[in-house]
Image (cartoon, grey):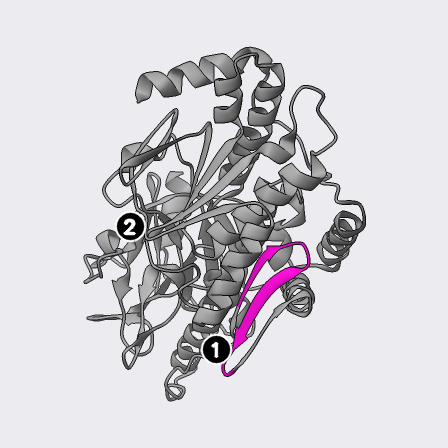
Amino acid sequence: MQENQEKARRPRVVPRIVIVGAGFGGLAATQALARTPAEVVVLDRRNHHLFQPLLYQVATAGLSPADIAWPIRGILRSQSNVTVQLGSVRGVDLSAREVMVGDARLGYDYLVIATGARHAYFGHDDWEKFAPGLKRIEDATTIRRRILLAFEMAECGRDPAERRRLLNFVIVGGGATGVEMAGAIAELARKALASDFRHIDPREARIVLVEAGPRLLPSFPPELSEFARRSLEKLGAEVLLGKAVTGCDADGVAVGDARIEAETVIWAAGVMASPAATWLGAECDKAGRVIVERDFSVKGHPEIFVVGDTAHFSEGERMLPGVAPAAKQAGQYVARVIDRRVRGQKAPAPFRYRDWGNLATIGRKSAIVAMGRLSFKGWLAWVFWSVAHIYFLIGLRNRIVVALNWLWSYVTFERGARLITGIDAEDVQASRDALRKAS
């Protein structure tokens, strides 16, 4: 370790660009720096890049984790100026221009922070153990386990009231993740699992989507939001609008003055930026996003850039949305800024976001698409959504596997990844007892 620290502090022949985070923004920046005469170091807490838009399909047994995740080293193996390092950043020494990684320090000439976002429970962090969010593969497999275990425990149960509680599923938050999760769970219960059990009817499962705002999917036009609500209700899901969750424990949630008893609660209501603002001592917004300059640099530190869900970037009165295309475009722009500085050239033209539109799927054969003045819904939108997501996957293998999985599911209604992992029958009751004790 001492040898690595000494190596990191030696005089450098070419500038060193450190990129923290290999999500959409960080990976886009790294790949755009392929021809830059610089040493690029990519730091990430995990060894894989994750295609988060399809994470809900892992959580609902539609895809396996390997279908939507790729080793970072594999993606960047042909980029000769890149070194990949596994590590967790605990801070940044601004005066020394060093990133603190565990017990080591890594010097930089330019620093790009693309560390994404985490779940936000609006001051109720104790709810996380009862209502997991969906940001990582581990989150998806945890939710998948809880969903499938609920059906298994209901099959073995004898108390009708407990069976009903086990077959209640509550999703908190009516954004894209919440809508897609609600639709996927409804289809899982009413189609894929419909004939698998002998003592329960999975089609009797109650799926409730709770949204504090007046409509679902507020970033979409109102008519598409209404279509999404009607589509969910056709699938058998309940949609509660204008209702906020006021309590959450191991046995369910409180929604206003009412209570929904449920074994499985999923959180999709909000996000909070990574602690990058704390590392940098930078100004941030209420969600913890670093307020950046027009070139995504941090005020007073032109050598430090922040992109993706960690950045607060405004074009006039409009803030850059926290979606994958925005993060990729920001990462590519920052790479151009750095490349021109390294080469001694003038800065590129100011950043302009190209909005390719919003997409969300509600279930099999149903989706909504909003692209500027153009919007459409239903089966055609679902085909467009499917093609777009397959196109943005990394690697031919993954595109083929996901396309074949979706085709098989479309024809047969089957879900091939219905695996309960990380726990066995003896651990189930102990896990439930621990959650109840915590509440």
Q: Where's residue 347, x and y in %?
A: 37, 86
> Which sits in the foreground, 26 or 341?
26
Mark before the other along the chain sequence, 1 or 2: 2
Q: Are marks 1 and 2 in contact (CB under 8 Å)?
A: no
Residue at 27 percent across and 37 percent down: it is 257
Residue 226 shown in magenta = no
Identified by mark 2, the residue type is Pro
Q: Secondary structure at mark 1?
A: loop
Q: CA distance from mark 1 to mark 2?
A: 27 Å
Q: Is residue 146 visible in this depiction of the protein? A: yes
Tell me the residue that label 2 is attached to: 275
Q: Secondary structure at mark 2?
A: loop
Query: Residue 132's quadrant in the figure?
Result: top left
Quadrant (top left, top right, bottom left, bottom right) of the N terminus: top left
Q: Where's residue 4, x and y in %?
A: 42, 45
Q: Main secondary structure of the magenta part?
A: strand
> Which sits in the foreground, 436 or 204?
204
* Relative to 20, 199 lies left or right: right
* Relative to 257, 32 lies left or right: right
Residue at 61 percent across and 14 percent down: it is 156
The stretch of residues the image draws in magenta is 359-373
Residue at 43 percent across and 56 percent down: it is 175
Query: Residue 342's quadrant in the figure?
Result: bottom left
Quadrant (top left, top right, bottom left, bottom right) of the C terminus: top left
Judge whether 296 appears above or below 435 on screen.
below
Indicate which label's residue lies in the foreground, 1 or 2. Answer: 1
Question: Crowding near pointer 2: few (<14 within 10 Å), some, many (20+)?
Answer: some
